[in-house]
Image (tube, coloured by chain):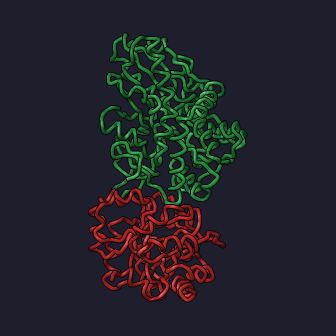
Chain colours: A red, B green
């Protein structure tokens, strides 16, 4: 059984997203362990990109901070190796396609395998373009389904690996006070063909939302709310020394995990 | 593999949220482009509103001065709103209306596409919002006011490099947020399929007219067609109907900014490499980690790190040639045409004029060159004055 499959066997999964290198890689590394300790079942690591078109302001700014700290794809791979030496938490990359293309598809996925990455989410690689990467060296390609997917849901769900990522709302990532999409009917259609668990993300930030959505989904994904905590701590005059944001992030994850 | 390939370039690399919409757009476009009523309506708008066909003007004084090939200017600057952008916008806004959309959004660099969009939206009763980088709103203040005058809302983009690339990012984010009633009227031959094909088709009116006009005036095809290239819409429009005429040299002029050996340029073909960005595979200015590079050009309209996928393909096959032209060379050409012919060109188009001057010298007098004069230069006067150290404020 893969690490991702395993993560969904213990009840509803809490999937935490942070941007790698925000505000530096030492912090990211410590945060992964802290989040695991606090109840995160899977961690998504964003590879920072200059132009993240699917992201709202919170994660856009995390990308800017990460790139300013000098993060590169190779440095992220080194960090993943260090994490994997001590932990079996499933690790998923979220990256735009261009840094992967530039690295070389084959080299990138081989390196993922070696370092211990389990899955990958590529927001600008829709179903029709999956052939772009013919050999993924066993790394799960986790596809997205949107509120506008309609007749595309079944074929995307059927081809899903790892888990199916359902986008809760129209628009970019970010904290939303209310999620109005009829998630139930999207999930019902997806379940007809999906062979993998279903997780919902985009906008979720309160324990109430998490509780509500976890009734119908197998997991929930939270990004902007966590990244915002990191940003707020990082905004202190001293910057964010390694370790400073562990505590509030850990406390937040405990609260969210309890709700699902 | 998705549709819309030019060799290896093109494709549809966009978020899932937009996939159904972009497929609907493709279907609607393929239907309406062969619909007689739609074509008649568009032709009427182009001829009776935008002022087509545009002149093919023989620049006699300039030709004499250069003592080489005859220079012809395809006068897209004389179109309503002052550039070639109106050709595409009238097509797209009309199509959006047929699709039942009530709102159009668009990015703009220099403001020419934004103004054209706001104009078409006013005429065709559509709501309109334009996204423009902060740096561009500062260098093109008059165009911001012009768009507002036409009833559009202008959103100032403060993310990233605050120029055209970031305006595209922000317009895509807005489209993902509100896709049902909104059409994204992309301004160039870039982005995901069907935009590169559709915008090319709407702009190809330039070469359809120019080819017939030059045959009528000269009885022969031109030795070369020269156009400036950012995303590349006026260039593909100017090249398209000459593509089968192998004797016609097609030249796209990229913005070399302060020079291709500096960090400050936007010369995608000269210095870029294969990438995927803004929905398409093509050439992009980027670093070794695949981060899109900040680019520079004196011209806001060419200040873009990529190039349309069909141009990338024409470069790969060698059918078209792409050359870098610096800020300084473009400014000199801007001043030259103003004094020589009494025509103030857009600083974008001045890149093409500069290169045409270089090649005209070496050609015999019986030959002719067509330059696509994609826009007029009123919008650039203050910026060129500042470049020359004249303290002029709008």
Please name whichever residue, B258 or A172, is drawn nearer the observer in this view of the structure: A172
In the displayed structure, B102 sits above or below B350; it is below
Which residue corresponds to the image point at 44% horizontal and 54% vertical from the top-left?
Answer: B13
Which residue corresponds to the image point at 48% horizontal and 71% vertical from the top-left?
Answer: A165
Which residue corresponds to the image point at 65% horizontal and 70% vertical from the top-left?
Answer: A180
Outermost residue, front direction?
A192
Residue B100 position in % (x across, y down):
65, 47
Question: Could one spot residue B265 in this view of the protein?
Answer: no
Residue A57 position in % (x across, y down):
57, 64
**How many numbered circles are shown?**
0
Locate residue A87: give its quadrant.
bottom left
**Left or right: B198 with respect to B253?**
right
Question: Could one spot residue A190 in this view of the protein?
Answer: yes
**Left or right: B121 with respect to B109?**
right
Which residue corresponds to the image point at 56% horizontal and 84% vertical from the top-left?
Answer: A256
In the displayed structure, B229 sits above or below B1; it is above
In the displayed structure, B367 sits above or below B201; it is above
Residue A190 position in % (x across, y down):
49, 71
Locate residue B35: give its quadrant.
top right
The quadrant in which the C terminus of chain B is found is: top right
Residue B167 position in % (x across, y down):
55, 50
In the displayed structure, A256 sits above or below A94; it is below
Please name whichever residue, B120 or B287, is drawn nearer the observer in this view of the structure: B120
Please name whichever residue, A159 or B74, is drawn nearer the observer in this view of the structure: A159
């Amino acid at each position: 059984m893969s690490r991702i499959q395993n993560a969904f066997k213990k009840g509803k999964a809490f999937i935490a997203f942070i941007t790698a290198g925000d505000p530096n890689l030492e912090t990211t590394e410590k945060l992964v362990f802290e989040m695991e300790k606090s109840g995160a079942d899977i961690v998504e690591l964003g590879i920072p990109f200059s132009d993240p078109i699917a992201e709202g302001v919170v994660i856009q700014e995390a990308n800017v901070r990460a790139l300013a700290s000098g993060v590169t794809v190779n440095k992220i791979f080194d960090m993943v190796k260090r994490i994997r030496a001590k932990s079996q938490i499933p690790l998923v990359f979220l990256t735009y396609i261009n840094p992967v293309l530039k690295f070389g598809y084959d080299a990138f996925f081989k390196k993922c395998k070696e370092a211990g990455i389990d899955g990958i989410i590529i927001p600008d690689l829709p179903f029709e373009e999956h052939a772009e990467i013919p050999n993924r060296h066993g790394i799960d390609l986790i596809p997205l389904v949107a509120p506008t997917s309609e007749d595309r849901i079944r074929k995307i769900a059927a081809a899903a690996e790892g888990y199916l990522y359902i986008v809760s709302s129209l628009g970019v990532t970010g904290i939303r006070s209310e999620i109005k999409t009829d998630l139930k009917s999207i999930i019902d259609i997806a379940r007809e063909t999906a062979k993998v668990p279903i997780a919902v993300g985009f906008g979720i930030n309160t324990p109430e939302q998490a509780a509500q959505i976890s009734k119908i989904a197998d997991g929930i994904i939270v990004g902007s709310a966590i990244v915002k905590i990191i940003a707020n701590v990082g905004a202190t005059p001293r910057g964010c020394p390694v370790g400073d944001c562990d505590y509030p992030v850990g406390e937040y994850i405990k609260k969210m995990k309890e709700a699902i | 593999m998705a549709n819309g390939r030019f060799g290896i370039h093109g494709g549809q690399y966009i978020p899932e949220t937009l996939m159904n919409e972009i497929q609907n757009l493709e279907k609607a476009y393929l239907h309406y482009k062969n619909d007689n009523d739609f074509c008649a309506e568009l032709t009427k708008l182009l001829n009776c509103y935008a002022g087509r066909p545009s002149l093919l003007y023989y620049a006699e004084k300039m030709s004499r001065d250069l003592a080489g090939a005859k220079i012809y200017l395809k006068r897209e600057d004389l179109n309503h709103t002052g550039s070639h952008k109106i050709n595409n916008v009238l097509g797209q806004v009309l199509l959006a209306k047929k699709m039942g959309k009530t709102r159009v959004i668009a990015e703009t660099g220099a403001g020419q596409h934004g103004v054209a969009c706001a104009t078409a939206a006013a005429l065709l009763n559509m709501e309109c919002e334009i996204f423009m980088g902060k740096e561009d709103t500062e260098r093109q203040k008059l165009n911001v006011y012009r768009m507002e005058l036409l009833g559009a809302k202008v959103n100032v983009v403060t993310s990233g490099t605050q120029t055209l690339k970031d305006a595209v990012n922000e317009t895509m984010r807005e489209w993902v947020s509100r896709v049902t009633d909104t059409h994204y009227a992309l301004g160039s031959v870039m982005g995901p399929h069907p935009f590169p094909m559709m915008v090319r088709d709407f702009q190809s009116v330039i070469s359809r007219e120019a080819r017939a006009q030059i045959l009528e005036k000269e009885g022969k095809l031109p030795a070369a067609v020269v156009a400036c290239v950012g995303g590349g819409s006026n260039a593909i429009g100017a090249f398209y109907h000459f593509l089968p005429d192998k004797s016609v040299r097609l030249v796209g002029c990229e913005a070399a900014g302060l020079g291709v050996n500096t960090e400050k340029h936007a010369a995608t073909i000269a210095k870029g490499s294969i990438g995927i960005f803004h929905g398409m595979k093509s050439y992009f200015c980027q670093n070794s980690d695949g981060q899109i590079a900040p680019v520079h050009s004196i011209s806001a309209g060419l200040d873009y790190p990529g190039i349309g996928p069909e141009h990338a393909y024409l470069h790969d096959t060698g059918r078209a040639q792409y050359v870098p032209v610096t800020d300084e060379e473009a400014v000199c050409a801007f001043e030259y045409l103003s004094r020589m012919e009494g025509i103030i060109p857009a600083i974008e188009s001045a890149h093409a004029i500069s290169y045409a001057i270089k090649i005209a010298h070496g050609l015999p007098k019986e030959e002719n060159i067509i330059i696509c004069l994609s826009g007029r230069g009123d919008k650039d006067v203050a910026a060129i004055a500042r470049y020359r150290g004249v303290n002029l404020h709008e």
